[in-house]
Image (tube, rainbow, N blue to C red):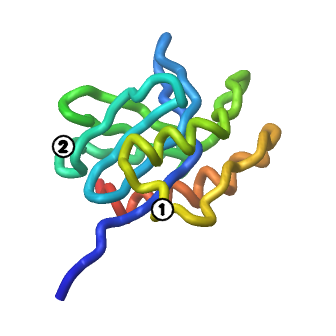
Amino acid sequence: MTTTAPVLASPAWIIGGLRNRPGYLVTAEGRIAFTDGETTYFDAPLPQVTDVSYPWYWFGGGFVARVAGEKFKITFVKPNGMPSPNPSALEVGLSVLGVAAAFQGVSHVGDLAGLAWIAPGRAATKQWREILPA
């Protein structure tokens, strides 16, 4: 029996201090990456994602984890005052992992406003929980 590696791409934000960055969190081929289109903040094998937690006070909107030993806070709900991810960042994220063909039909989520990000953000967190259990 063979299992297929998870394939997922989500608009997301790295948050915390001066590192607030919009981009895309992407996984495929057993790897995970976060890019904003100009900078790839991490690209690592999934087993290097450790200490995953889903803080209750984020109400299902993201997670905290160590990726290759560095701590990251990832939210899928747009923080107030932050820009939306650049649509071209999705293409870069897919090319970082070399899996653009695997994402046929994946598209950028438009620039939603305010509370409109909550439902898609919580849905994304639910999907990522399957890939990155706590």
The crowding category of the residue bearing disc 2, from other C-alpha atoms within 10 Å (few below 14, some 14 to 19, many at least 20), is some
Q: Quadrant of the C terminus?
A: bottom left
Left or right of 64 in this view: 14: right
| Count of picture labels | 2
* Residue drawn at the location 39% of the way across and 41% of the way down: 96
* Residue 17 place in picture, x, y as percent: 48, 13
- From the image, tell me which residue sits under label 2: 48
* Residue drawn at the location 82% of the way across and 39% of the way down: 113
* Residue 49 place in picture, x, y as percent: 24, 44
| Occupied quadrant, residue 128 | bottom left
* Residue drawn at the location 54% of the way across and 24% of the way down: 21
Q: Amino acid at mark 1?
A: Ala
Q: Quadrant of the N terminus?
A: bottom left
Residue 101 is tagged as 1
Which residue is more in the foreground, 4 or 77?
A: 4
Disc 2 secondary structure class = helix
Residue closest to the far right: 113
Left or right of 18 in this view: 133: left
